[in-house]
Image (cartoon, grey):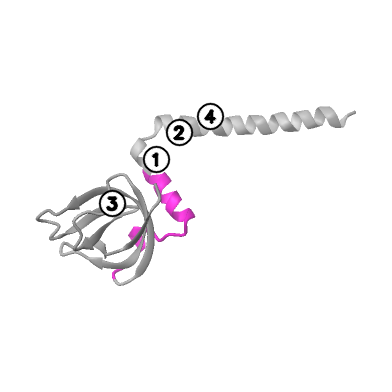
C-alpha cells in the first residue's frame, strides 16, 4: 500500500517540473525579442539537420546549408539574367545565384530551403553559391 502514495508524489513532481519548464519557455517567448528567437530557432534547426553554418563556410568549400530566404530578385539590373536569393541560416547570409533563370517555382521570400553547392564570392565579397541544388523544406 505504501507504493501508491509515493508513486503519486513522484508523478506530481514530474508534472510540476513540466509545468515550470513550460512557463519558463512561455515567459521567454513573450519577453524576448522575436527576431532573436527566430534566429536561435533557425540556427538550432540547421544544427539538427547536420548542415554547416554559413558563418563557418569558406570559399571553395562544398557545403550543405539550411536557412530561410530573406529576399529574392529576378531579372533586375543587379541580377544579370538570373535569380538571386538571400539565404539566412541564423549565423550569416549567403547569396544563392541561379544563372540563366528568369524565375524558379517555389523560390520566394520566407521559404526555408536546404541547399547544396560550392561556396564562392560575389564582386562585393559576399559569400555566394552558384546554381545550388535545393530542397524546399517549408
Determine contact: label 3, label 4, CB under 8 Å. Answer: no
Separation of marks 3 and 4 at Cα, in angstroms: 41 Å
Check the image and name the residue furthest to the bottom: 60
The answer to which of 109 and 43 lies nearer the viewer is 109
Residue 109's x, y, as percent? Answer: 27, 45
Disc 2 is placed on an element classified as: helix
* Circle number at residue 37: 1
| Magenta-drawn segment | 39-59
Determine contact: label 1, label 4, CB under 8 Å. Answer: no
| For marks 2 and 3 on the same chain, the one whose residue lies earlier in the sequence | 2
Overall secondary structure of the magenta stretch? helix
| For marks 4 and 2 on the same chain, the one whose residue lies earlier in the sequence | 4
Determine contact: label 2, label 3, CB under 8 Å. Answer: no
Asked whether 9 falls inside the magenta stretch, the response is no
Residue at the image point whose x is 82% and y is 27% from the top: 5
Q: Residues within 10 Å of mark 1 (few under 14, many from 20)?
A: some
Determine contact: label 2, label 1, CB under 8 Å. Answer: yes
The answer to which of 102 and 121 lies nearer the viewer is 102
Check the image and name the residue furthest to the left: 77
Residue 26's x, y, as percent? Answer: 48, 31
The answer to which of 4 and 77 lies nearer the viewer is 77
Quarter of the figure with the N terminus: top right
Residue 130's x, y, as percent? Answer: 25, 65
**Residue placed under numbered mark 2 in the picture:** 28
* Circle number at residue 105: 3
Residue 90 shows in the view: no
Separation of marks 2 and 1 at Cα, in angstroms: 9 Å
Q: Hey, which quadrant is residue 59 in on the image? A: bottom left
**Residue placed under numbered mark 4 in the picture:** 23
Q: Is residue 29 shown above or below 116?
A: above
Q: Residues within 10 Å of mark 3 (few under 14, many from 20)?
A: few
Amino acid at each position: 500500500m505504501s507504493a501508491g502514495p509515493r508513486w503519486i508524489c513522484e508523478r506530481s513532481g514530474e508534472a510540476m517540473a513540466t509545468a515550470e519548464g513550460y512557463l519558463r519557455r512561455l515567459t521567454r517567448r513573450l519577453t524576448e525579442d522575436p527576431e532573436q528567437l527566430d534566429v536561435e530557432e533557425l540556427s538550432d534547426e540547421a544544427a539538427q539537420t547536420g548542415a554547416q553554418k554559413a558563418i563557418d563556410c569558406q570559399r571553395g568549400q562544398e557545403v550543405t546549408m539550411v536557412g530561410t530566404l530573406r529576399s529574392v530578385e529576378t531579372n533586375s539590373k543587379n541580377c544579370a539574367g538570373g535569380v538571386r536569393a538571400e539565404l539566412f541560416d541564423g549565423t550569416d547570409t549567403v547569396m544563392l545565384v541561379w544563372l540563366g533563370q528568369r524565375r524558379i517555382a517555389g523560390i520566394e521570400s520566407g521559404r526555408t530551403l536546404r541547399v547544396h553547392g560550392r561556396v564562392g564570392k560575389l564582386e562585393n565579397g559576399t559569400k555566394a553559391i552558384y546554381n545550388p541544388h535545393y530542397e524546399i523544406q517549408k
